[in-house]
Image: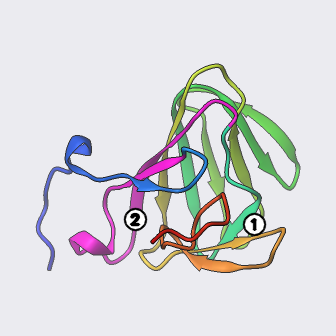
Amino acid sequence: MSLPRILKINEITPVERGNNIKTSPLAGEMIGSTVLSNGITCFPKGGGIPLHTHNVEETVTILEGEGICELPDGVHPVKPFDTSFVPAGVVHCFRNTGNTEMKILWVYGGTSVTRTYTETGETVNQLSPSDRVDGKAAD
């Protein structure tokens, strides 16, 4: 059984996702979670992750900035506290269209999360060295 705890964002080393997109993983398998994972991703002006799907449900809440969420029914503008729900297997993406950094809080309904990029069909483990938007695997 894992222990309850407070996760301090300034004590977490962000994962570089390419193109200056950074993700700070919070709860997940690494702390003993068995059914969910979450974190914060920061997108610079103009930054985004290409269209993709996940093997689990996802919800995203915009914390700062503004952007768009692309879903099968169209492109939706998003601003702070707007929240998406995306079932497993549904194509989607977020892009920062504002003039400042955009921060999102994401929550997955699982700890073993994959991302399948729509354009290439490549499936990678979420936040693995291969899960980068610039196509360059991290060392």
Q: Is residue 29 left or right of residue 121?
A: left
Residue at label 1? Answer: 90
Give x and y (percent) for residue 66: 64, 27
Q: Residue at x 33, y 68 (%)?
A: 28
- Give the crowd class for mark 2: few <14, some 14-19, many >=20 residues within 10 Å: many
Mark 2 element type: strand
The alpha-carbon separation of the residues under discs 2 and 1 comes to 18 Å
The residue that appears at 49% across and 64% down in the rendered structure is: 108
Residue 124 lies in quadrant: bottom right
By what rule are the colours in the image chosen?
A: rainbow
Q: Which residue appears at 57% of the width and 60% of the height?
A: 58
x, y percent for residue 63? 48, 32
Image check: 48 left or right of 111? right
In percent of the image, x 67 and y 53: which residue is there?
Answer: 49
Give the camera-side residue of 91 and 97. 97
Which numbered circle lies on residue 29? Answer: none
Tell me: residue 44, above or below residue 30.
Answer: above
The amino acid at mark 1 is: Val
Expressed as whole percent of the image width and height from the top left, the position of residue 35 reads 38, 74
Viewed as shown, does residue 132 lie left or right of 28?
A: right
Q: Nearer the viewer, residue 23 or 111?
A: 23
Task: Assign the C terminus to one quadrant of the image.
Answer: bottom left
Count of marks placed on residues: 2
Q: Which mark is residue 37?
A: 2
Amino acid type assigned to the residue bearing label 2 in the image: Ser
Q: Secondary structure at mark 1?
A: loop
Magenta span of residues: 21-46
Magenta-colored stretch includes residue 83: no
Percent x, y of residue 8 = 20, 45
